[in-house]
Amino acid sequence: MEETIAELRETFRSGTTKSVSWRKKQLKALLDLVNENEDSIFNALDQDLGKSRVESYRDEVGVVKKSATYSLSCLDKWVAPKKGEVPLLFFPAKAEVMPEPLGVVLIFSSWNFPISLALDPLIGAISAGNTVLIKPSELAPACLSFLVQTIPQYLDNKAIKVIGGGADVGERLLELKWDKIFFTGSPRVGRLVMTAAAKHLTPVTLELGGKCPAIVDNTLSNPSKAKVTAKRIVGGKWGPCTGQACIAIDYVLVEEKLASTLIDILKKYIKRFYGDNLKELKSISRIVNKNQFQRLVNLLKDPHVASSVVYGGSVDEEKLVIEPTILLDPPLDSEIMNEEIFGPLLPIITLKNIEESIEFINSKPKPLVIYAFTEDKAFKKRILSETSSGSVTFNDSMVQFLCDSLPFGGVGQSGFGRYHGKYSFDTFSHEKAVLHRAFYPELEPRYPPWTNFKLMFIKLAYGFNYFGLMLLMLGFKKS
């Protein structure tokens, strides 16, 4: 392991990865990797998570293609130094901000999107000119095997490496010195990563998760808008890896008088999208392993939680499948309402007035995303100004993740740092400030050394730039 990292560090020192042509070559090779191995990726995702080809392309293959293509089209602009403004106080001078790679980067990817969450951060690290070691999750073994075998065939193996193994390998990696650690996973493991990184003062980006709420106001009173709302909730909850996603809707907040309307429409679209028979569910992933399956089953074993189930609840232990399940007002002190669900269970919490949703959300840790289905401009403004979250999406779900022009990341317990598009490039770069001064003019002052008099002029120089220019031209700068 130490030899691997030594080779990555030596490659970075050689300057190879700083070349824009090298970066573009790697990004194009990454596109070739995905394009030429689609079927292998689909098969691996099916083995690990039971993902359909449509879901695999939408959430994995398509994400990587889009991200790599976008980075290729923008790379020349991203790497160019940006002109910096210089106050007249420093005349004659010029300044620029120059992005430079951080060095040797460690990327931990997660099991729920084992291809895109490994390769999408890699695209940012390559674009910024770093060398990279990827540690995919061992909980998606087929995808891990695919990445370990395939990446060396396409990418520069002296600069980009993949390592397999379990938690013990991850612990060993964290004992070593890195220039950046990028982690996607649970808050529990995120704390371990941050603790280990602190020993070496290594900067980290933590993409975690949390309980992402969806607020639904009285737009449900409009039949056509109610249908759209229900479709987007069903797609945003059960579509991405059957709810095993950090940005999946975790629970819904709705007024009491509208709850039955919402539930009826949700049932309709669950049946249309996925079917209504546990044995014949279609286009839906399975739970990743027995431990996760049992964790979700245990959430439903609480008698008060079980009694709140209004749709679904059936499980197939052999196939690790839990049908889409809706719960109405489970106890707020139950585990299902205080831990991230990360599965196909959807609690619906009723309120007297939808305005109370803001206080409800603020009573919990800051979520990764808030979804709100509303056209009320005043209510939108309140949500934006009175809550804190990684992002807010109005009248849809999940789509913010696919927008390269927007940053993706959490706040507080849902993580920190951001990526996607230019934000990925920035995450793996250091913006170096560069100031160029001229040797001339340089005039020697001949004034008496009156400290207070000089201090007065220096204060004026900082307050008014044209005074600063005058003072510098006179060479009035000695203490």
Image (cartoon, rainbow, N blue to C red):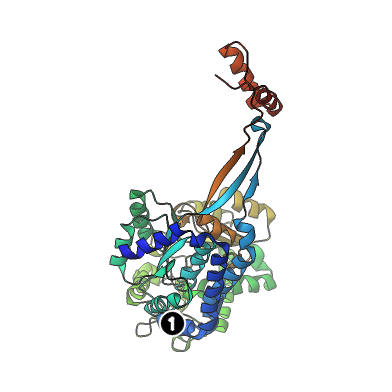
Q: Is residue 403 left or right of residue 174?
A: right
Residue at image position (53%, 51%) is 388
Residue at image position (65%, 72%) is 228
What amino acid does circle 1 point to? Ala
Q: Residue 183 location in percent, x, y? A: 42, 61
Q: Residue 172 location in percent, x, y? A: 29, 62
* Front position in the image: 414 or 296: 414
Q: For mark 1, what is the residue?
A: 44
* Front position in the image: 400 or 331: 400
Asked where in the image residue 227 lies, by quadrant, the reply is: bottom right
Asked where in the image residue 135 lies, by quadrant, the reply is: bottom left
Residue 440 seen in the current view: yes
Q: Is residue 317 left or right of residue 265?
A: left
Where, quadrant-wise, is the N terminus in this rendering? bottom left
Residue at image position (59%, 54%) is 355
Q: As displayed, is residue 467 above or below residue 54?
A: above
Q: Residue 412 location in percent, x, y? A: 46, 51
* Front position in the image: 45 or 158: 158
Asked where in the image residue 188 lies, by quadrant, the reply is: bottom left
Residue 373 seen in the current view: no
Where, quadrant-wise, is the C terminus in this rendering? top right
Q: Residue 102 location in percent, x, y? A: 47, 54
Q: As displayed, is residue 442 above or below residue 369?
A: above
